[in-house]
Amino acid sequence: MSPTTTATKYCHACAQIIDSRAEVCPQCGVRQPMMYTGGGLGVTTASGKNRVAAALLAIFLGGFGVHKFYTGKVGMGVLYLVFFWTAIPAIVGFIEGIIYLIMSDAEFAAKFG
């Protein structure tokens, strides 16, 4: 029998490593934000970003960089806006949307959380 490992996260107040299922930090007592949407369409990160929403924005509005603004990459979003007329950002946005869809929720939360 292999030992089980518990997923961990950082407390949003004191930055201590705690169990990912903890609703309240045992170190400082601060209630942790809920991370699961319950709808089954991916995980919402602590900052409110959803992987499926980001993927759909990238696929359908990626040419304008909307997904970059959504994920907090404002500089890249502006770059996409400047070059949207070349259609290159639309192609790259479509590819990024596919990448977001095949990315795990944990990877998305680590990258954009």
Image (cartoon, helix red, strand yellow):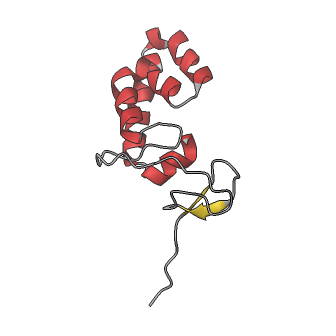
105 and 78: which is toward the camera: 105
Q: Please identify the quadrant where the C terminus is shown.
A: top right
27 and 8: which is toward the camera: 27
Rendered residue at 40%/49% (across/down): 36
Rendered residue at 50%/51% (across/down): 107
- Where residue 34 appears, as percent x and y from the top left, is 46, 48
Q: Residue furthest bottom?
A: 1
Rendered residue at 63%/56% (across/down): 29
31 lies above or below 99 = below
The answer to whether 56 appears left or right of 3 in the picture is: left
- Where residue 56 appears, as percent x and y from the top left, is 34, 31
Q: Residue furthest left?
A: 39
58 lies above or below 108 = above
Residue 64 picture quarter: top left
Rendered residue at 40%/28% (across/down): 58
Q: Please identify the quadrant where the N terminus is shown.
A: bottom left
How many numbered discs, if any? 0
- Where residue 87 appears, as percent x and y from the top left, is 42, 16
The answer to whether 90 appears left or right of 10 in the picture is: left
17 lies above or below 97 = below
